[in-house]
Amino acid sequence: MLKSFRYLFLPFSFLYGGIVWIRNWLFDKNYLKSAAINFPVICVGNLAVGGTGKTPMVEYLIRILKNQYKIATLSRGYKRKTKGYGLADENTTALEIGDEPMQFHQKFPGVAVAVGEERLVAIPNILHDKPDTQVIILDDAFQHRVVRAGLNILLTDYNNLYTRDFPLPAGDLRDIKKSAIRADIIVVTKCKHKLSEDESEMIKKELAPADHQKVFFTEIMYANPYHLFSKKEIEITNDTAVLLVCGIANPKPLKSYLTTHVHTYDMLHYADHHIFKIDDLEDIQKQFGKVSSDKKIIITTEKDAVRLLKFENELKDFPVYVLPIEHHFMFNEGEQFNKMIINFIRSFDK
C-alpha cells in the first residue's frame, strides 16, 4: 500500500524500478549469466521487502518433506556477524547464521541449515558437506537470479498484493511486478479467516497468472505458546494480559490475533531482525512491571526468540512465551500444493 507521504518518493521509485528492469533484462537476454542446477532446488521468495511469511513457508515445506527426503535450507543469513558460507552445528548461534536459519536449526535438528550470500558457491558446498542431501530450499532468493531454481514459490500479502504496490522507496517492492512471471506457484498469504471463493477469484484475476502458474491462498494459524526456556505449552485465555515483544516487519496479524484472544496487550516493537541488548532487556522488564494484571505474560515471536535465548539469566524469572505461526491452506487446496512439491522432486528420479 502507498501511504500519502510516500508519494514524495515516487521519482526515486521510477529510477529504482528502471534499474531493476535493466538488471532483469540483462538476465533474460543472457548477458548476465544464471545457472540451472540438475538437482531439486525450491526457492521461496517475494517481490516486497519482508512480511509475507517466507519463514513459515520454508517450515511448511520442511514438515511435508522431512519424512521422505534429506533436506537442506540455504539462506543469506541477514544481519549475521559472519560472512561467506557456513553450515550450522551444535555450537552455532544466531549471531553466526542469522535468526531465521537459527530457527530452522533449532526446530528441525535433522535438516542441514546453511548460509551464504553467494548461492552458486554455497550449493556445491552443501552437497560436499552433506552428500546425502536430496532437496535444497532457498530462503528468500527470488531476486537472486545467478541461481535458477527448478521451482519458484512467490508469496504476496493479501493486505498488500504486489499488483497494488510500488517499487522502493515509495512502495515496498524490491523487484518489478513483471518478475512474478518467473514464479511457478503464487501464494496469497495472511488472508482473512473467512475469505470467500468469489473474492479469491477476483484476486486471481487481478494477479492474472500465466498458464504455467497456480495460485493458492493461506491464512495464519497460531499454535499454543511455549515457554522460551522450558518449552512448556500454555493456553492463552481472554483474561490474560500480554506484553508483546517483537522485531518483525509486519506485526499486524499478530496484533489482530491478540486483540481477539487476550484481555489486553501492550507492545514493544523493534526493527525487523533487531539484535537485543541488555538495555532492551531492562526496557522489557520495566514495561512488564507496568502491566496491571495478576495473570500476565510476555509473548514474542519465534524469530525474536532465537535472539532472546542468550539472556536466560536475565529472563529466567519472567514468563516469556513464544507464539508459533504456521500457514494453513484455504479451500482444501493444501494437498494439491503438497502434491505439486512432491511431483517436482520426483521428476528428478526419471
Image (cartoon, rainbow, N blue to C red):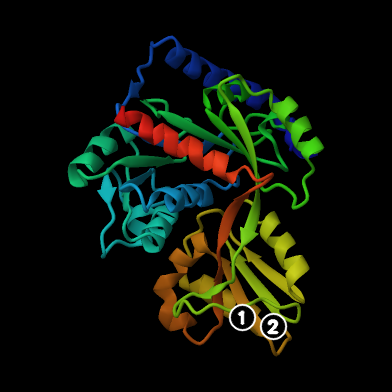
Q: Secondary structure under badge 2?
A: helix
Question: Which residue is depicted at the point 49% across and 39% down?
Answer: 339
Kindly tell me whether residue 248 is visible in this rendering. Answer: no
Q: Which residue is mark 1?
A: 286
Drawn side of residue 161 relative to residue 49, left or right: right
Residue 221 picture location, percent across and down:
63, 58
| Residue 198 horizontal side relative to residue 31, left or right | right
Q: Where 26 falls versus 193 (above or below)? A: above
Query: Which quadrant, please, contains the C terminus?
Result: top left
Residue 77 rendering spot, x and y as whole percentages: 39, 48
In the image, 189 versus 310, the foreground residue is: 189
> Callout 2: 10 Å neighbours few (<14), some, many (20+)?
few
**Residue assigned mark 2:** 290
Quadrant where the N terminus is found in the figure = top right
16 or 104: nearer the eye? 104
**Quick check: can you spot residue 314?**
yes
Q: Is residue 280 above or below residue 176?
A: below
**Tag 2: amino acid:** Lys
The residue positioned 53% from the left and 22% from the top of the image is 20
- Residue 157 in the image: x percent, y percent? 66, 42
Q: Residue at x 61, y 80 (%)?
A: 286
Question: From mark 2 to mark 1, how far is it between C-alphas?
Answer: 7 Å
Query: Do the CB atoms of the residues marked 2 and 1 lie less than 8 Å apart?
Result: yes
Disc 1 is placed on an element classified as helix
